[in-house]
Amino acid sequence: MPETMSIRIVACGRPEEQDIHVEKAFLQQGLPGVEVVFRVCETTDDVKAAAADADALLISFAVIDENVLNAAPHLRCIAVSATGYGNVDVAAATAHGVAVCPIGEYCTDEVADHTLALMLALLRNLKHYTRQIEQDAVWAFDSAVCRRLKNLTLSVFGFGRIGRAVAKRAQAFGIRVLAVDPYVPPEVFASTSVTPADIDTALRKADIITNHMNQTSGNDGFFNLGAFRKCTRKPLFLNIARGASVNEDDLCTALDEGLLSGAGLDVLRDENPDLRNCPLVGRDNVLLTPHAAFYSQESLADLRHIPCSNLIHFFHGDYDRIQNLVNPQALA
């Protein structure tokens, strides 16, 4: 990369995300002379305006579609500060010659640990016991029903890195694991002692369901009342992936009708939910966490540095060093 090259990188985010001093220092060290600015992007027009004179975008949840790309004649790369990138129209970006680089790996252990934490807390009724003690001053172990973990069946939807890490942890408790993922070869299931299953079988046999599927247009509202009615064992339902995978009204109905015994959710469809009016709040058998499964001090540092490294490698032409370039054909 010529030293005189002028590069403008625009970070798009919510108002509370505008402290980018870490990213700016990292980028300026790797790309001397680079201009790094932050723009609040809460609407499509905001994103279009931010992209208009950008050579690269640094985003988390900003939606990048054909309209944005048409307004960004200089744009060459989109670095996503997340492993999921359903908010980016990759086909359109490729057609415009724009590389898309989400994070490949940074928080597998944290997400898997968080999944097990929710599962264990629900199976052992910790929320119920805590409320009973702190609010009612009642000390009674038999006010809730607990089940032995050994020999329960966990159905994992999405058997990538995180799904496999969850399976390994669950197996340590003696839990049997089924997994649904048509993209995973048989040898992976065999090597992890996990049984592949179709959707209906996984729902029917599950004592616990955990969702780790990537968000796609094909799985929006995947977990709906039709799916929950196929559950015969009143399983726990865990969603640690994307809120869009779940029809939340149907989830509430399934909980109310006893189709599910409880739910642990790290994500909701709305990234900024109205918690005062959320029908999932206030239930003894529901645990909610604020999209926190990814979080540790270590993972947060990786989350800030990896997208910047990807941009540095991109502008130096070191494409093989980019952690996760999902559309290399855009470089042609």
Image (spheres, helix red, strand yellow):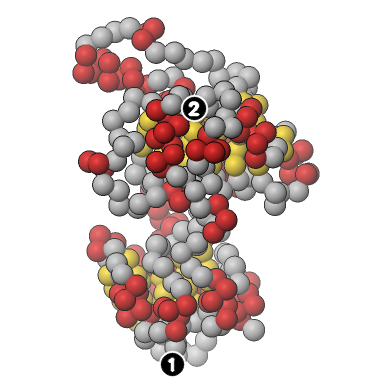
Rendered-image quadrant of the C terminus: bottom right
In the displayed structure, 157 sits above or below 183; it is above
For marks 1 and 2 on the same chain, the one whose residue lies earlier in the sequence: 1
Where is residue 46? Give x, y as percent. 30, 74
For this view, does 8 lie left or right of residue 215?
A: left
- Residue toward you, 71 or 321: 71
Circle 2: residue type = Leu
Q: x and y percent of residue 99 in the render?
A: 54, 76
The residue singled out by tag 1 in the image is 4
Residue 136 drawn above or below residue 158: above
Q: Residue at x 65, y 40 (%)?
A: 199
Taking the spot 45% from the left edge, 51% from the top edge, the residue there is 244
> What secondary structure is marked by label 1?
loop
Disc 1 vs disc 2: which is toward the camera? 2
Where disc 2 sits, the SS reads loop
| Observer able to see residue 115 | no
On the question of residue 15 being in view, the answer is yes
Q: CA distance from mark 1 to mark 2?
A: 63 Å
The mark total stands at 2
Q: Is residue 102 placed above or below 315 in the rendered structure?
A: above
Give the numbered dot on residue 305: none
Q: Quadrant of residue 124?
A: top left
The x and y percentages for residue 175 are 61, 25
Q: Residue at x 43, y 92 (%)?
A: 4
Residue at 45%, 45% (x, y): give it: 247
Name the side, left or right, on which 323 lies relative to 146.
Answer: right
Q: Nearer the viewer, residue 199 or 14?
A: 199
Q: Quadrant of residue 137?
A: top left
Where's residue 310, x and y in %?
Answer: 51, 70
Q: Which mark is residue 259?
A: 2
Query: What amino acid is at disc 1?
Result: Thr
What crowding class fits label 2: few (fewer than 14 Cα within 10 Å), some (14-19), or many (20 or more)? many
